[in-house]
Image: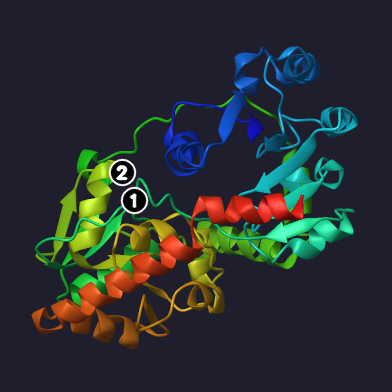
């Protein structure tokens, strides 16, 4: 299958992860992805004007047009023109949980809309989308492979600690539980400058209006206000003898870390919503990278997450702070090394059988 992917191919992690996860796995199964990069043009207008001629003049006969970008970069009229060419169209909404309006104008024109969060499906139905498929993220089983060796009795976290992440790590270290945190931000004392994307102006009034139009948006908006003007929560990672701070790691290094740490922390709470009585949870790549690497994932309980991996057999889930601490101590105990390894093997098997990108795309093709 030849796929034309409308995709901002930018030199940062937010774009490159798709190479490692999606592009690599699909290529191994005989599929080819050609990128149409809107950043190669002066502005979105020029990019859209050249899209149809690009398809018509290409030597490749495309089977599928795929897009993950917002209305500001790809116009609904362009998608309709592609549809008129007889080319199947797929919209992927990676952030539809908290930012569904990014695709409001174009979504109804696509043959199939892939949502990675089910909570806002009703909005897409309201906008006129007829064919909607919910399925979450996945992980590439060829890249993320187990590398089991000598167990390390620690809770590891790969990523930048802020907000709820900081609070959760502090809870562990304050309970004399050793944590390894891999973050350049902590090592360097500042966040590295990111490459800036071209400015697509969205009125702040529209952003507020969109946020207030659905329940999750209102909660995210309220928690942001709560954090900025009321609680002013500036969580700081406490210095501790039980905390080891290390530089960020590559995907290759990630495999060994997840494979051999007793527990690998997955924090699913969205943005500032940890300040709410009932925080909002979002599934991320980490949810599937950890088990695919042969790691034992440690995360707050949600019905969705419990549906992907079996608690106590493939994953460790907790429902309270007390349970969080007690389970951490249990699985870090050297007497439970054999149990941890067996659970890691179980998790890898489940991930490899059910949570690959090829499995996700097979469902896409069946729906198309």
Residue nearest the observer in this picture, 219 or 252: 252
Query: Which residue, given by chain and number where applicable, does mark 2 sit on?
Result: 251
Would you place residue 1 above or below residue 51 in this image? Answer: below
Residue 249: tell me if it is visible.
no
Q: Whole-percent x and y of residue 122?
A: 80, 64
State the residue at coordinates (61%, 22%).
Answer: 37
Would you place residue 154 above or below residue 324 in this image? Answer: above
Residue 293: tell me if it is visible.
yes
| Left/right of residue 138 with respect to residue 108 in the rendered view | left
Query: Which residue, given by chain and number where applicable, does mark 1 sit on?
Result: 144
Would you place residue 77 above or below residue 181 in this image? Answer: above
State the residue at coordinates (77%, 39%).
Answer: 89
Give the label on residue 13, or none. Answer: none
Residue nearest the observer in this picture, 121 or 326: 121
Q: Whole-percent x and y of residue 157?
A: 28, 59
Q: Quadrant of the N terminus?
A: top right
Q: Whole-percent x and y of residue 333?
A: 13, 81
| Left/right of residue 335 with respect to residue 127 in the rendered view | left
Rate crowding at label 2 as few (under 14), some (14 to 19) or many (20 or more) other CA atoms within 10 Å. Answer: some
Q: Whole-percent x and y of residue 160?
A: 34, 50
State the image quarter where residue 38 is shown.
Answer: top right
Q: Can you tell which of label 1 and label 2 is closer to the viewer? A: 1
């Amino acid at each position: 299958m030849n796929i034309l992917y409308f995709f901002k191919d930018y030199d940062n992690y937010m774009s490159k992860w798709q190479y490692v996860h999606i592009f690599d796995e699909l290529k191994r199964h005989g599929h080819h992805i050609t990128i149409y990069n809107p950043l190669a043009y002066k502005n979105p207008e020029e990019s859209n004007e050249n899209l149809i001629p690009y398809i018509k003049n290409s030597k490749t006969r495309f089977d599928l047009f795929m897009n993950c970008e917002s209305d500001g970069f790809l116009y609904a009229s362009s998608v309709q023109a592609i549809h008129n060419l007889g080319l199947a169209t797929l919209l992927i909404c990676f952030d539809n949980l908290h930012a569904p309006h990014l695709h409001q104008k174009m979504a109804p024109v696509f043959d199939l809309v892939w949502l990675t969060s089910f909570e806002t499906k009703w909005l897409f139905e309201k906008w006129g989308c007829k064919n909607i498929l919910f399925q979450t993220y996945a992980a590439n089983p060829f890249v993320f492979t187990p590398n089991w060796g000598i167990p390390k009795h620690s809770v590891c976290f790969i990523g930048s600690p802020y907000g709820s992440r900081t609070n959760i790590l502090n809870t562990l270290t304050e309970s004399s539980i050793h944590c390894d945190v891999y973050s350049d931000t902590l090592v360097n004392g500042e966040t590295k400058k990111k490459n800036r994307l071209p400015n697509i102006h969205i009125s702040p009034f529209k952003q507020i209006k969109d946020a207030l139009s659905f329940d999750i948006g209102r909660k995210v908006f309220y928690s942001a206000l709560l954090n900025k003007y009321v609680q002013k929560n500036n969580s700081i990672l406490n210095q501790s003898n039980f905390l080891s701070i290390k530089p960020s790691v590559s995907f290759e290094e990630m495999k060994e870390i997840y494979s051999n740490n007793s527990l690998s922390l997955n924090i699913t709470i969205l943005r500032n919503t940890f300040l709410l009585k009932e925080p909002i949870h979002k599934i991320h790549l980490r949810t599937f990278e950890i088990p695919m690497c042969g790691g034992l994932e440690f995360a707050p309980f949600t019905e969705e997450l419990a549906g992907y991996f079996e608690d106590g057999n493939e994953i460790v889930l907790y429902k309270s702070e007390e349970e969080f601490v007690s389970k951490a101590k249990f699985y870090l105990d050297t007497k439970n090394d054999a149990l941890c390894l067996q659970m890691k093997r179980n998790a890898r098997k489940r991930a490899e059988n059910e949570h690959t990108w090829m499995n996700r795309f097979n469902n896409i093709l069946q729906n198309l």
